[in-house]
Image: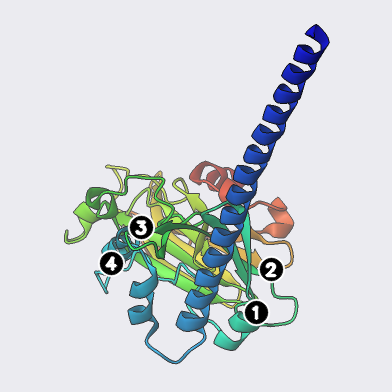
């Protein structure tokens, strides 16, 4: 009798375990299927977005509103509302200013980033030989109707929403001068910023200006120590202008060295092969403050003199040490 009772108890226990395992597997299978379905729907949504906005002749700014969340629309509007001082002067969904719609459609690939709402969109902007693929990492969210919307670009400095990015911060600087370099494979932009408080001042000196480098609309480097700082004993104007040609750009500025006015020219070279922005040449022209007509020899150094120096390592201190 005892053996029979023991047998029945064991049988009931094993049956309960099997039912529990079956139920667990059913739930897991359902969750897995649901995740798979959501992923497929999300990828389909992103494909529709890129095909509709960048693969058709319709107004893509109007089309975008159908696919973007409210916070993304507001952020883009805040960054592009001033036509004379654009902060976002590229299309963040392609990380550039121009594109070939046919190339995007032909080369478009979308993969999950291991999360149900994060995906990598990859494509060739122009389909040129040896062109590197553009990668856009996007986070989605569903609205109240259950439809997907683009809610964040994870690898864009303005639309990753990692900052508070208040209106006050947006208005802290304006673009004083800029230059675009259209290379064979990439587009570069150099921006020199100035504090907004100095925007309408007359005879203002431009000192310690931040300089930002962008590649295909994405920030790749910044320098806060290349433009010489303010010197109250020097009436020189500081930063003068940016000049660009081919794959070179030059930062012109003026400062004082003892009793001399100095006009300096710092030229950088964009080396597409290595991907580096390198110091190419540094020169200074001198004028005696008390005797402007006195001839003084200029000084110029090139990469042959100082070797390989990347943009991010070039500072006021380094330039002064070179000469």
Closer mark to the observer between disc 2 and disc 4: 4
Q: Mark 2 or 4 closer to N-term? A: 4
Q: In 3D space, how far apart are the residues under numbered discs 3 and 1 (Cα atoms)?
A: 27 Å
Image coordinates of residue 16 in percent, x first then y, are 67, 28
Q: Earlier in the sequence, mark 3 or mark 4?
A: 4
Q: Nearer the viewer, residue 10 or 322?
A: 10
- Residue under the image location 25 percent in, 69 percent down: 81
Which corner quadrant of the image does residue 279 belong to? bottom right
Could you say whether the residue bearing mark 2 is in a helix, strand or loop? loop
Callout 3: helix, strand or loop? strand
The residue tagged with tag 4: helix, strand or loop?
Answer: helix
Q: List x then y, in percent, for residue 240.
A: 37, 63
Is the residue marked by circle 4 packed among few (<14), some (14-19), or many (20+) residues within 10 Å?
Answer: few
Mark linked to residue 77? 4
Q: Is residue 193 visible?
A: yes
| Location of mark 2 (residue) | 272
Would residue 205 be visible to someone looking at this image? Answer: no
Q: Residue at x 79, y 7 (%)?
A: 2
**What residue is shown with label 1?**
184
Residue 33: % across, % down: 61, 55
Residue in view at x 44 percent, y 68 percent: 242
Graded by Cα atoms within 10 Å as few (under 14), some (14 to 19) or many (20 or more), the crowding at tag 1 reads: few
Query: Which is closer to the viewer, label 1 or label 4?
Result: 4
Separation of disc 2 and disc 1 at Cα? 9 Å
Rounded to the nearest angstrom, the CA distance separating label 2 from label 4 is 33 Å
């Amino acid at each position: 009798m005892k053996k029979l009772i023991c047998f029945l108890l064991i049988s009931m226990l094993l049956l309960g375990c099997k039912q529990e395992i079956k139920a667990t597997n059913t739930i897991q299978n359902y969750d897995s299927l649901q995740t798979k379905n959501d992923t497929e729907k999300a990828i389909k949504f992103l494909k529709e977005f890129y095909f509709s906005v960048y693969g058709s002749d319709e107004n893509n700014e109007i089309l975008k509103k159908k696919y973007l969340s409210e916070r993304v629309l507001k952020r883009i509007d805040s960054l592009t509302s001033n036509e004379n001082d654009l902060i976002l002067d590229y299309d963040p969904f392609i990380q550039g200013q121009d594109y070939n719609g046919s190339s995007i459609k032909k080369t478009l690939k979308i993969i999950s980033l291991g999360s149900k709402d994060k995906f990598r969109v990859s494509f060739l902007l122009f389909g040129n030989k040896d062109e590197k693929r553009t990668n856009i990492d996007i986070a989605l969210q569903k609205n109240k109707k259950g439809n997907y919307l683009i809610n964040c670009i994870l690898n864009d400095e303005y639309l990753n929403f990692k900052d508070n990015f208040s209106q006050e911060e947006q208005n802290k600087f304006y673009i004083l001068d800029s230059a675009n370099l259209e290379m064979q494979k990439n587009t570069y932009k150099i921006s020199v910023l100035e504090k907004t408080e100095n925007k309408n001042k007359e005879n203002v000196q431009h000192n310690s200006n931040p300089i930002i480098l962008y590649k295909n609309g994405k920030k790749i480097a910044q320098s806060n120590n290349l433009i010489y700082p303010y010197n109250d004993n020097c009436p020189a104007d500081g930063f003068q202008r940016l000049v660009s040609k081919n794959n070179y750009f030059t930062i012109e500025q003026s400062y004082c060295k003892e009793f001399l006015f100095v006009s300096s020219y710092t030229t950088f070279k964009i080396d597409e092969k290595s991907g580096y922005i390198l110091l190419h040449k540094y020169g200074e022209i001198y004028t005696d403050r008390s005797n402007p007509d006195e001839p003084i020899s200029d000084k110029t150094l090139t990469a042959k003199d100082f070797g390989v120096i990347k943009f991010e390592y070039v500072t006021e201190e380094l330039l002064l040490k070179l000469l």
